[in-house]
Image (cartoon, rainbow, N blue to C red):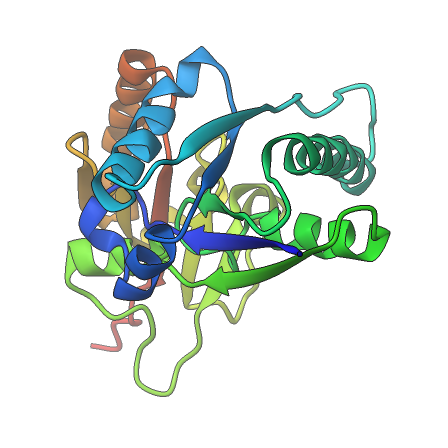
């Protein structure tokens, strides 16, 4: 018998972000796997545990934490550094599946937001399947992504009529902002990369801890808001030990009057 594994998008922290498909899948799960990111993100583990208690119980299940090694700062090239980190994660997942999930059992990896957007889970599962050491099948279940949660929080559409949306990272934004990018969703921004953007040309819609009791949101002209956002962001990180935030930069229409 082959093992079954679900990669389930769980949204950004609100239990009501789970789809009915996700809830149905969780009702069949025997083991839930997650990467242990240390004490500073213990609240994320607590939220995952609460989701399991709400949607799996009273069915018996086990929570298995997989130690997550940090990226090797000694590897200068970014792509090579991420690839080496993925390889360590791959070996850790492979070992955990072999030890903790028996043939014919069903496991799940709970993915913040949606598995298709800036998350390595699906790449790891694809590589694990190609290695062929463990026989398993896997299924992907979509979740509410942080761009969707941001748009809902600010009551806006991400694209304008006939327009496109660029989804990128803070690291890429700090390198360059494409001239044609009028609407830019920025994720994984370790340091506020909007400092590199012409502040008088854009509005910003910012959110942090979306879907959780700590939710924060600020919107307005970038030149008027960026100092407030930076200060709020720093204070929140200091208080909670971690932060997950996202923002939309929207180029303002040129005043032709």
Residue 64 visible (yes or no):
yes
The residue that appears at 66% across and 56% down in the rendered structure is 2
Q: Depth check: give the residue in front, 179 or 237.
A: 237
Residue 59 x %, y %? 30, 41
Q: Position of residue 177 (x, y in %)?
A: 55, 56
Looking at the image, which is closer to me, 12 or 130?
Answer: 130
Looking at the picture, does residue 160 appear above or below residue 16?
Answer: below
Residue 253 screen position, x and y as percent: 29, 71
In this rendering, position of residue 118 left or right of residue 74: left
Res 100 quadrant in image? top right
Of residues 53 and 114, which is closer to you in this image? 53
On-image quarter of the C terminus = bottom left
Instruction: Quarter of the image for the N terminus: give it.
Output: bottom right
163 vs 5, left or right, is: left
Number of marks present in the image shown: 0
Q: Is residue 208 visible?
A: no
Q: Which residue sits at x=25%, y=60%?
A: 151
Residue under the point 32% across and 28% down: 230
Q: Is residue 48 left or right of residue 82?
A: left
Quarter-of-image position of residue 58: top left
Q: Position of residue 68 (x, y in %)?
A: 61, 24
Q: Nearer the viewer, residue 94 or 212?
A: 94
The residue lying at 24 percent from left, 54 percent from top is: 17
């Amino acid at each position: 018998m082959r093992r079954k594994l679900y990669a389930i998008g769980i949204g950004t922290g609100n239990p009501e972000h789970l789809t009915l498909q996700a809830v149905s899948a969780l009702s069949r799960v025997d083991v839930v796997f997650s990467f242990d990111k240390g004490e500073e993100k213990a609240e994320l583990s607590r939220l995952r545990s609460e989701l399991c208690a709400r949607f799996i119980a009273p069915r018996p299940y086990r929570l298995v934490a997989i130690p997550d090694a940090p990226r090797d700062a000694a590897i200068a090239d970014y792509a090579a550094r991420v690839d080496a980190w993925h390889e360590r994660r791959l070996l850790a997942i492979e070992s955990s599946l072999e030890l903790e999930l028996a043939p014919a059992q069903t496991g799940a990896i709970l993915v913040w937001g949606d598995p298709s957007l800036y998350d390595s889970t699906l790449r790891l599962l694809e590589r694990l399947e190609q290695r062929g050491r463990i026989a398993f099948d896997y299924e992907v279940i979509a979740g509410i992504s942080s761009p969707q949660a941001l748009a809902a929080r600010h009551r806006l559409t991400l694209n304008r009529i006939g327009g496109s949306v660029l989804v990128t990272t803070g690291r890429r934004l700090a390198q360059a902002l494409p001239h044609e990018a009028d609407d830019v969703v920025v994720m994984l921004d370790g340091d506020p990369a909007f400092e590199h953007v012409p502040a008088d040309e854009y509005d910003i819609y910012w959110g942090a801890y979306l879907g959780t009791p700590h939710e924060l949101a600020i919107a307005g002209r970038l030149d008027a808001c960026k100092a407030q956002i930076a200060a709020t962001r720093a204070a929140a990180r200091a208080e909670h030990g971690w932060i997950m935030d996202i923002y939309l930069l929207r180029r303002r229409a040129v005043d032709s009057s």
